Image (tube, helix red, strand yellow):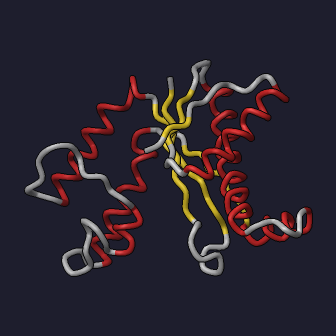
């Protein structure tokens, strides 16, 4: 089994974030899990010398903005950018495939309102997110078909309204296509 960790970006102010992106990494836990855990433990010790216990969860949003465990007062921008660079190297360092799906929020909004002028803002947001999510899933599917005969388990943020929409759409696709591999979406 392959594990696929997905996360999204671009869900805040549309003027500042015109694209919604769902990106992730595919991990073979039998081959890479211990190595990855060890690497994150080493990064935890490097950046938090007194840290003991499980590895730190490095949230890029917190690192970038200087929040949470990475306050600007003790984590200047240069140090935060160095850490982000080290984190960005991990997929190449461990040979982890990356998948990305994205949608242009303005273009999707325009098309959806053209097709259904009365569509609510919440529905536009959910459908746009789901479009990016499905684009990422299609890339996972392609990688799986080209590289393994296993199945994948998707791990993504548990967003109730989006999860419900994705579940309904995936079931409809599965009935129509009849060939998709089965994925499990669980909350993180």
Q: Is residue 162 left or right of residue 2?
A: right
Q: Residue at x 76, y 67 (%)?
A: 120
Q: Residue at x 65, y 49 (%)?
A: 133
Q: Position of residue 135 (x, y in %)?
A: 70, 47
Q: Which of 93 and 13 is in front in this view?
A: 13
Q: Residue at x 68, y 51 (%)?
A: 130
Q: Which residue is drawn at 73% across and 27% down?
A: 180
* Among the 4 quarters of the image, the one containing residue 128: bottom right
Q: In this view, does 157 lie to the left or right of 134?
A: left
Q: Nearer the viewer, residue 81 or 64?
A: 64
Q: Which of 167 and 24 is in front in this view?
A: 167
* Among the 4 quarters of the image, the one containing residue 58: bottom left
Q: Is residue 137 left or right of residue 188?
A: right
Considering every residue shown, the one lying at the far right of the view is: 115
Q: Position of residue 41 (x, y in %)?
A: 22, 45
Q: Position of residue 166 (x, y in %)?
A: 67, 44
| Quadrant containing the C terminus in the rendered view | top left
Q: Say how many tags the image has.
A: 0
Q: Which of 123 and 81 is in front in this view?
A: 123
* Among the 4 quarters of the image, the one containing residue 122: bottom right
Considering every residue shown, the one lying at the far top of the view is: 149
Q: Position of residue 147 (x, y in %)?
A: 61, 26
């Amino acid at each position: 089994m392959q594990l696929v960790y997905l996360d999204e970006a671009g869900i805040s102010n549309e003027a500042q974030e015109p694209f919604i992106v769902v990106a992730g990494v595919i991990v073979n836990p039998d081959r890479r899990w211990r190595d990855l855990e060890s690497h994150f433990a080493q990064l935890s010790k490097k950046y938090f010398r007194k840290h003991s216990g499980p590895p730190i969860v490095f949230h890029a949003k917190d690192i970038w903005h200087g929040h949470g465990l990475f306050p600007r007062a003790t984590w200047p921008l240069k140090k935060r950018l160095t850490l982000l660079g080290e984190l960005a190297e991990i997929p190449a360092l461990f040979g982890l495939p990356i998948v990305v799906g994205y949608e242009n929020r303005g273009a999707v909004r325009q098309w959806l309102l053209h097709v259904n002028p009365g569509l609510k803002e919440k529905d536009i947001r959910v459908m746009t997110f789901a479009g990016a999510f499905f684009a990422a899933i299609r890339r996972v599917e392609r990688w799986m078909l080209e590289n393994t005969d296993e199945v994948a388990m998707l791990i993504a943020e548990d967003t109730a309204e989006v999860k419900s929409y994705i579940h309904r759409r995936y079931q409809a696709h599965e009935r129509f296509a009849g060939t998709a591999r089965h994925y499990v979406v669980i909350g993180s």
